[in-house]
Image (cartoon, rainbow, N blue to C red):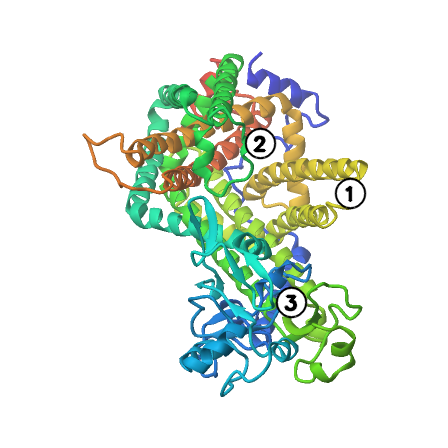
Amino acid sequence: MTFAEEASDTTNSEDDTPGDPKKFDPNFKGPVAKRSCTDVLCCIIFILFIIGYILLGLVAWVHGDPRRVAYPTDSKGHFCGQKGTPNENKTILFYFNLFRCTSPSVVVNLQCPTTQICVSKCPEKFLTYVELQFMYRKNKNYWTYYNQFCKSTFIKPAKTLTQVLLDDDCPTAVFPSKPFLQRCFPDFSTKNGTLTVGNKTNFEDGSGKTRNAIELRTAANRVNKILDAKAIGMKIFEDYATTWYWILLGLIIAMFLSWMFVILLRFIAGLLFWVFTGGVIGIIGYGIGHCYREYHNLSGQPNSHLSIYDLGIQTDISTYFQLKQTWFIFMIILCLLEVLIILMLIFLRERIRISIALLKEGSKAIGYIPTTLAYPLLTFIFLSICISYWAVIAVYLATSGVPVYKVITPEGQCKHENTTCDPEIFNKTEIAKACPGAQCNFAFYGGTSLYHQYIPTFQIFNLFVFLWLINFVIALGQCALAGAFASYYWAFKKPDDIPPYPLFTAFGRAIRYHTGSLAFGSLILASIQIFRIFLEYLDRRLKKAQNNISKFLQCCLKCCFWCLETAVRFLNRNAYVMIAIYGKSFCRSAREAFNLLMRNILKVAVMDNVTDFVLILGKILVAGCIGVLAFLLFTQRLPMIIEGPTSLNYYWVPLLTVIIGSYLVAHGFFSVYTMCVDTIFICFLEDLERNDGSTERPYYMSQSLLKILSEPSMQTKKA
């Protein structure tokens, strides 16, 4: 039975007769021109939310101060390096005693229970306060050097070590350090496999104890991750600086490849599909062969037999590529992917012919409306504006308020721990007497006003409206593209009857009449996404307190809401197509789209997946071709053809950048194609239900599509 016969049986089984005006309108010539505004209430709510979002941005701009993110802050809440202040030339934050950073009071912003001051440079040598007192008698320059790391300026080191510890005026010792993220961190290095600080493994901490470099590194364990990230970050930056023009060239080639494939799909969709398939299978096969060669070459290497679990977490990613297990895992994944693609080709070979016909029809539509290929750029601009505005508001909200100081103790066992305090009078309060060694240090920016109390709520509002706007921008693009492609499908004589500027017209209709409907669909999707984010937040906050049952339930909730979001996203896309064609409200369009799809569930289940599969192959082929070329270039395997960059630290960093960037470029082009095919498929289903292929009610589909989908005796409506 053909698609047309299936549709005829389905239509006749409905309550509506073939002559019902719901099914056939002889004057219907594509997207309805005479429309009225839909979902006005949701449009008003959406506009009010946008106005509130703008007002929130203004309020956050008044109260926030991004300098609090750009500059480190000392224990008194003063910025280091801020112009027009006494700390203008003191751009680096110095910690008096990093050994206290093992305290549970250490917070994310590198605040630990020790005094922090702004300095102009980091210490360059070992020196304790006790040693200084002896050296000062011989050379006063030692005090000049040491005094720059004290809170106050003293004429000479007259105080005893006990007084210094009580008053916390100076550090008991300084160690060789280097600035990173505008903070002084120990200058760790490795000598003959031994960790050292300033070429020393053991040193005095200034309080009478002998310490070693391992203890200092353990004390600064949070800092170690940053130091490791620094080394990796610097190497990655060097690789990007060396290969940026190659990356840009790869993205440009990916753009031309995608554009070329879109054009070729119009003429040789069938051949190109098998090129896609053969290319993807070949690229994956090359990957399997390369993994096997690497696996075989590592057979005689020492330590290559170790597992990833034995190696543990390593900051140097290249270490994992020295293991046989890594390449074996890659080879298994690629083999499974290869088998999966081949099985899909075998079992879906009949439906692939229909998908190819839809692809050809989509190529014709894009050929007649080429401006649709430029629309992803407009979507990218809108999304960039939304993301930038959200990020700016988030930063301004996070930096709103006045400095708040908290009581911090080295051992974290004081009953006044984490209570607010005033650093100016702290040493005279009962807290300082009750908790020896306690510090009144800067903690964060906040306040007690109504605005400051609702900052977390404002952050949630910022995130929710951001998600709403992101989904609205995507919905607007889908509706505009659907309107343009529907104008092509329902044209009486293609391309003569296609209205002028179809994309611009469809975009204007969507904005003028259906902002409320698009906002309604976007609101549903944003609500699901914010709930998923809330579940993820709870999972991270309660991870240690969860039992197996709660973990299982939470996993089920995550899975259910992921499925719900996927289903809503699919239904929304088809609802936007119906809105673009008929101009009805969101709920009515969604219901009609759902009913239409349910009446043709077998076609939808196969056609949608097969067409997506074909387009995904195209994306993979574009990214794979560029990826293989980049791999050969970055690994110096094309010296006879072209000389690529040399001495890369991590060749996989620019390689992954090129592959991911090429895939996103291809996705931008093929997303237009996906919307085109989806729109034509919905119009095709509507065409089957509206018409019967007779002379009085002929099909609007093209002859090429009709040959695949319908009886040969049926004819399309031609001039």
Q: Can you say whether 402 is above or below 474 in the image?
A: below
Q: CA distance from mark 3 to mark 2?
A: 35 Å
The residue identified by callout 1 is 546
The residue identified by callout 3 is 113
Residue drawn at (71%, 77%) of the image: 421
Secondary structure of residue under mark 2 = helix
Secondary structure of residue under mark 1 = loop
Q: Earlier in the sequence, mark 3 or mark 2?
A: 3
Q: Residues within 10 Å of mark 2 (few under 14, many from 20)?
A: few
Name the residue type under label 1. Answer: Gln
Q: Nearer the viewer, residue 602 or 386?
A: 386
Whether residues under marks 2 and 1 lie with C-beta atoms below 8 angstroms apart, the answer is no
Q: Residues within 10 Å of mark 3 (few under 14, many from 20)?
A: many
Q: Which mark is in front, 2 or 1?
A: 2
Outermost left residue = 640
Q: Nearer the viewer, residue 140 or 405?
A: 140
Q: Can you say whether 622 is above or below 126 in the image?
A: above
Q: CA distance from mark 2 to mark 1?
A: 25 Å
Q: Which mark is in front, 3 or 1?
A: 3
Secondary structure of residue under mark 3 = loop
- Percent across and percent down for residue 146 are 47, 76
- Percent across and percent down for residue 453 are 72, 70
The residue identified by callout 2 is 309
Q: Nearer the viewer, residue 220 or 395?
A: 220
* Residue 496 visible within the image: no
Quadrant holding the C terminus: top left
- Percent across and percent down for residue 526 are 64, 49
Residue drawn at (55%, 41%) of the image: 581
Q: Can you say whether 703 is above or below 668 in the image?
A: above
- Percent across and percent down for residue 416 are 78, 71
Q: Nearer the viewer, residue 14 or 289?
A: 289
